[in-house]
Amino acid sequence: NGNYDGLIKATNLFMQADSSNQLINQYNGIGYSMNKEYDRAIYRLKSLFHQGDSSFLTNYYLGASYFATGDYETAYDHLNLAYRIDSTNQTLYYFLGKSAIYCGYQQKGIQILNNGLTKLIPKDSVLFNYYYTISHGYGALVNYPEEIKYLKLCYKCNPGYKLALYTIAEIYDASLNDPVEAMVYYNQFLATRPGTKTNVPANPQGASYYNAVEHRILELKTEQESKKKKK
């Protein structure tokens, strides 16, 4: 019922009478994990794991708790063990793939996330998370064409994520040395700037991006005109 405080209280009371019950210890650890008390969850579930509990639930929630604390290497190890037991869990794909990318296994993480996409037809908000993380993985692999591909998919899922256009332009500009495509996406990003007619004020951070893009567009135009004159 989502009453994790009640679950923790009930299992703690049970363990006062019988601290060796594996199932109750597991539920207690899951309760702490779902209640975002990750250190306590890790303590309880890690103890079970070292006692020989290799079940899906123990590895899944232990991995998820490590993931929440930023220990992606250990999270990957336990989530991978859970994946070997049950590869149908849709949420597991995302956490496993993301932890793989964040601890240096980018190609593996991308493969896992792509496999997850084939298993479900998620909402755009979920798709955005998948695509964004895959783009991050390809960026770490210095595979810019694939990074751009998934950033475009991010923007398609969430047009409010205007920074995708800026990032794509910057990749074309700084990494791929393609000023023509860079200009296309810089201009698309600039077109999203809130105008006076919309009565939507731009935040200071957003304004700085737009100002920087305006300046860079002028630089690129000057560079292109200079090259034409030399020819």
Image (tube, helix red, strand yellow):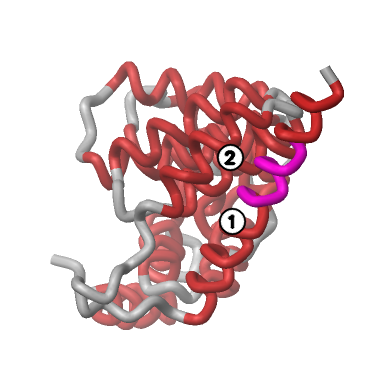
For residue 97, say whether it is visible. no
Q: Mainly helix, strand or loop, the magenta region? A: helix
Q: Nearer the viewer, residue 117 or 231?
A: 231
Q: Which numbered marker is on residue 230? A: none
Callout 1 amino acid: Val
Q: Quadrant of the C terminus?
A: top right
Label 1 element class: helix
Q: Quadrant of the N terminus?
A: bottom left
How far is mark 2 from mark 1, CA to CA? 9 Å
Q: Residue furthest front?
A: 229
Q: Can you give x and y, in whole percent of width and height, for residue 74 in the image?
A: 69, 48
Q: Can you give x and y, in whole percent of width and height, for residue 63 in the image?
A: 56, 49
Q: Which numbered marker is on residue 169? A: 2
Q: Nearer the viewer, residue 39 or 99?
A: 99
Q: Is residue 77 magenta?
A: no
Looking at the image, residue 176 lies above or below residue 199? above
174 left or right of 2 in image = right
185 left or right of 230 in image = left
Q: Can you give x and y, in whole percent of width and height, for residue 209 in the image?
A: 56, 64
Where are the magenta residues, as a range?
Answer: 217-223
Q: Nearer the viewer, residue 41 or 122?
A: 122
